[in-house]
């Protein structure tokens, strides 16, 4: 799909999502306020991924494809100087309301990840959650590297496509929250190699090998056992990380 069509498709999809969400906040605006732990623990990879950013106090941090901006709020609470961008004007409207409701100062910008409106070396840290897989990884990677300062670090949480059974399930099986844009695809080894050509160091850690079943299971003893088993298996057999549902990528400039 041509870049202009892809851009329009992505913006439209996320604007519709944001519009559906906005009805909830019109009825219950108090839900815009949230405790930090509710974001950091809503998926198993978020808290450990945030830890890869280190102490962000006083640092210039970019929330890359900020969406609802819960990460932006957490970063601002940690006393970072936060800039957040998103392609969707609808999501940015929600993001601004969330920042106001949580009484934090965040600079919001509407932008495309392939053409960032920021000067070279503008940021010490970059955070992104489920966004790189919507983009041309090579174009986005070079733009990301350009805006990172020397010694800067970017951390991204992304769906991973290395497990053939999971690929089948994503294509064929029904589950909550399955909606996606026509051009997005989970990252894989080819994407990883392209990032390794751009950044001085790329680290990958997989999450949810057995516990990917949480997409269809309710919280309970079985899910707790699967998550505990994952911690043991992935520590003892790192090769299994290539079959996980999600990966955390740490990109060093």
Image: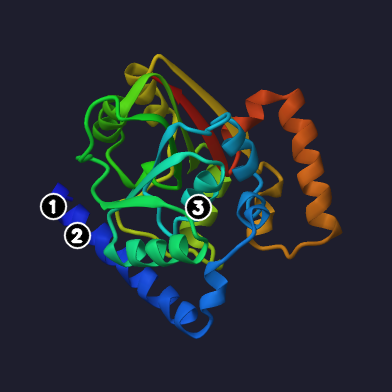
The residue pinned by badge 2 equals 8
Which of the 4 image quarters holds residue 54?
top right
Which of the 4 image quarters holds residue 237?
top right
Which numbered disc flags the more N-terminal residue, 2 or 3? 2
Judge left or right: residue 69 versus residue 41. left
Q: Residue furthest right?
A: 221
Give the image location of residue 179, x and y in percent: 43, 65
Q: Nearer the viewer, residue 35 or 240?
A: 35
Residue 73's disc is 3
Q: Which quarter shows the C terminus? A: top left
| Cα distance between the residues tagged 2 and 3 | 27 Å
The residue pinned by badge 1 equals 4
Give the image location of residue 182, x and y in percent: 30, 57
Give the image location of residue 218, x and y in percent: 73, 65
Which residue is at 38% across, 69% downward? 18
Judge left or right: residue 114 versus residue 248. left
Q: Crowding at label 2, few (<14), some or many (≥20) Cα neighbours within 10 Å?
A: few
Which residue is at 67% across, 51% downward? 41
Are circles 1 and 2 on residues that touch, CB within 8 Å?
yes
Relative height, residue 176 to residue 73 (above, below):
below
């Amino acid at each position: 799909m041509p870049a202009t069509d892809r851009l329009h498709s992505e913006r439209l999809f996320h604007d519709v999502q944001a519009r559906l969400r906005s009805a909830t906040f019109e009825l219950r605006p108090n839900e815009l306020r949230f405790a930090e732990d509710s974001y950091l623990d809503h998926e198993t990879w978020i808290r450990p991924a945030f830890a890869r950013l280190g102490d962000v106090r006083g640092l210039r941090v970019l929330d890359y494809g900020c969406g609802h901006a819960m990460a932006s709020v957490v970063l601002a609470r940690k006393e970072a100087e936060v800039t957040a961008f998103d392609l969707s004007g609808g999501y940015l409207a929600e993001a601004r309301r969330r920042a106001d409701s949580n009484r934090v100062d965040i600079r919001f910008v509407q932008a495309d990840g392939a053409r960032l409106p920021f000067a070279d070396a503008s940021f010490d840290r970059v955070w992104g959650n489920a966004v790189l897989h919507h983009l041309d990884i090579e174009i986005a990677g070079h733009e990301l590297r350009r805006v990172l300062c020397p010694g800067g670090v970017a951390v991204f949480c992304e769906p991973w496509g290395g497990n053939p059974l999971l690929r089948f399930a994503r294509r064929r099986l029904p589950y909550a929250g399955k909606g996606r844009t026509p051009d997005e695809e989970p990252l894989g080894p080819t994407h990883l190699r392209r990032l390794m050509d751009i950044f001085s160091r790329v680290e990958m850690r997989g999450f949810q090998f057995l516990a990917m079943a949480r997409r269809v299971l309710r919280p309970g003893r079985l899910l707790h056992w699967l998550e505990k088993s994952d911690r043991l298996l992935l520590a003892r057999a790192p090769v299994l990380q290539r079959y996980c549902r999600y990966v955390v990528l740490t990109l060093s400039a």
